[in-house]
Amino acid sequence: MRILITNDDGINAPGLEILDAIAREIAGPTGEVWTVAPAFEQSGVAHCISYTHPTMLTQFGDRRYAAEGSPADCVLAGLHDVLVDARPDLVLSGVNRGNNAGENAMYSGTLGAAMEAALQGLPAIAMSQFMGPRTSVLDNPFEAAAQHGTRVVRLLLDHGIWDEGPQRIFYNVNFPPVSGADVQGVRVARQGFRGIHQHGVEPQTSPSGRRFIWVKGGAQDIRTGPGTDVEANLDGFVSIQPCRADLTAHDALDALTRALDAG
């Protein structure tokens, strides 16, 4: 199996080392693992692509490249340049430092890479490690992902839904903020929502008088209800969310049509 890996934390991020180890186990001794990751951290860029300017691509080693662009740029570079004559069988993105559960998924460059891979017709899985007080005391805060990542990927490859439509399914996996031994299992979950005050800004004035803002997030341990990804993670479970690159509110289509026709 040929696997392309990427992330949004950058080519030197420790989570990418965890992902590389997972990918090598999945690929097997005769497989290939290729890395195309951002040269610098790209957290929060979602599905952004560098449409208006070029992206420099640098080879750092055997099957290892860095792109001065977004995670989605990295997938495009991997598919249409680095591996143009040897299309990968799977794209893995992560392991992100911090959860991409709940509304975090909408901002995630980790998911943006998996979404681009799916739009390009490839199976893709995004993986993130929920951090918290119980991971901060571990020698390896990615312990849950490191110990359970390979099993979860194999579970999805063997038993997941892998349709081949124009907006095919990709997966958002979040490992809970606990040690590897304390992981309770795996739960399929829908996206949760922690509330409307999760992101805001903190304005500051520089010594030169210029105005700047820092974007800041909210508490990550807010429960989001049964059946959701955040709830599963806080209960010690790996959450698996099937996703599509389709923003249509399908439940509103018929009602909106009737309302507009009546008007």
Image (tube, rainbow, N blue to C red):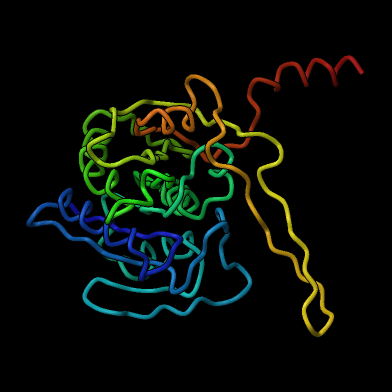
Which residue is painted at 37% across and 38% down in the image? 176
Quarter of the figure with residue 15: bottom left
State left or right for residue 51 relative to residue 40.
right
State left or right for residue 163 relative to residue 119.
left
Extreme residue toward the left, this view: 29
State left or right for residue 184 relative to residue 108.
left
Is 29 or 12 nearer to us in this picture? 12
Which residue is painted at 22% across and 51% down in the image? 22
Relative vertical location of residue 235 with respect to residue 45 in this rendering, above or below: above
Is 97 or 68 nearer to us in this picture? 97
Q: Position of residue 64 (x, y in %)?
A: 28, 72
Which residue is painted at 34% across and 51% down in the image? 137
Relative vertical location of residue 62 with respect to residue 91 in this rendering, above or below: below
Quarter of the figure with residue 113: bottom left
- Where, quadrant-wise, is the C terminus in this rendering? top right
Extreme residue toward the right, this view: 263
Quarter of the figure with residue 250: top right
Q: Position of residue 114 (x, y in %)?
A: 43, 49
Q: Position of residue 218 (x, y in %)?
A: 63, 45
Which residue is painted at 17% across and 48% down in the image? 26
Counting the numbered discs, the total is 0
Is 171 or 50 nearer to us in this picture? 171
Is 233 or 87 nearer to us in this picture? 233
